[in-house]
Amino acid sequence: MSILLNFGLPKGSLEDPTIKLFGKAGYHITKGSRSYTPCWDDSSIDGRFVRAQEMSRYVEDGFFDCGLTGRDWVLENESDVEIVADLVYSRSSNRISKWVLAVPESAPINSVSDLNGMTIATELVNVTRSYLAKNNVDAEVEFSWGATEVKVPDLVDAIVDLTETGSSLRANKLRVIDVLMETNTVLVANKDSWANNEKRAKIENIAMMLEAALQADSKVGLKLNLKRSDIDLVLKDLPSLRKPTISPLSDDSWVALETVIEKKVSRELIPALKRLGAEGIVEFPLNKLVP
């Protein structure tokens, strides 16, 4: 009898990016607009959507075998779970996010020690309290249900908020005075499920495919033809995952070269390759990349 893996997917801002990532990894997920139960094209996976803030507790308690949440919420909930993989993606970008301590630009506050006796609003209450205790600061920490950046300076003196680019903080005339932690999406597993060989193998397979899809996001494939006499000249500056593949053409004086490069370098690299005599240059997208 095949195993059934109960998988927790994040509801909210990560929902659509997660469905898209799974699709690129080869798992088709559908759901109704008001449904919390996804339909998978893999009969060995079941589960539902819940808030990322709650996910690690449900995984620890065994309601889910595994799930996607933030490293920050694992720490906030003090959850005893297995962190299987780091998956750096979010609603707007594939970059690491930060929980920062921010104050009004005009406030006479330059470090956390200046917050003694003041009030801080945040969703990340436990982590913030631990941070203050580590810095010997006695300040009130109150839970914020959202839109935290608009609460200063009228309702609170400072905030601890999550940011990727800092644009929202700047728009609200806030200044960052410290970084509490960096965070990203993680795949976590229940300890008992992780100890089950069949479930562990399934979880590891999913993790590998999700990581492969993310790896492919920032890279492209590149094919080109060049004279055999120019190989050393081209290889000197050609980035690749390891070493490019070089194949002979019907004309022995020419070869075909194929490699994988960072997407962002192609705009400079392709013109440079053309100037070096390369022909038939083709850039193509990658769906998955397993290093």
Image: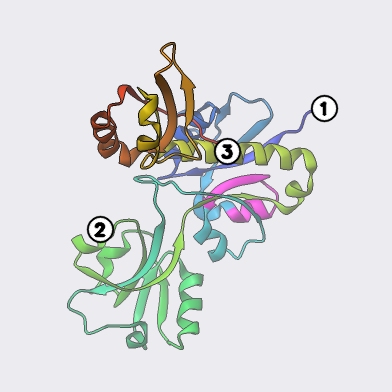
Is 176 rendered above or below residue 24? below
Judge left or right: residue 176 versus residue 126.
Answer: left
Distance from the alpha carbon under mark 1 to that under mark 2: 51 Å
Q: Would you call the spot at circle 3 few (<14 residues within 10 Å), some (14-19), or many (20 or more)?
A: some
Tell me the amino acid under the disc marked 2: Ser
Residue drawn where x is 48% and y is 22% of the image: 247
- Tell which circle, 1 or 2, labels the residue nearer the N-terminal end: 1
Tell me the amino acid under the disc marked 3: Arg
Is 64 rendered above or below residue 202? below
Q: Which residues are magenta?
A: 56-69
- Tell which circle, 3 or 2, labels the residue nearer the N-terminal end: 3
From the top left corner, tell me how far across and down residue 71 is, in percent: 52, 58
Instruction: Point out the image quarter for the C terminus.
Output: top right
In depth, the one of 93 and 223 nearer the eye is 223
Q: Residue 48, which numbered label? A: 3
Residue drawn where x is 19% and y is 67% of the image: 173
Distance from the alpha carbon under mark 1 to that under mark 3: 23 Å
How many marks overall?
3
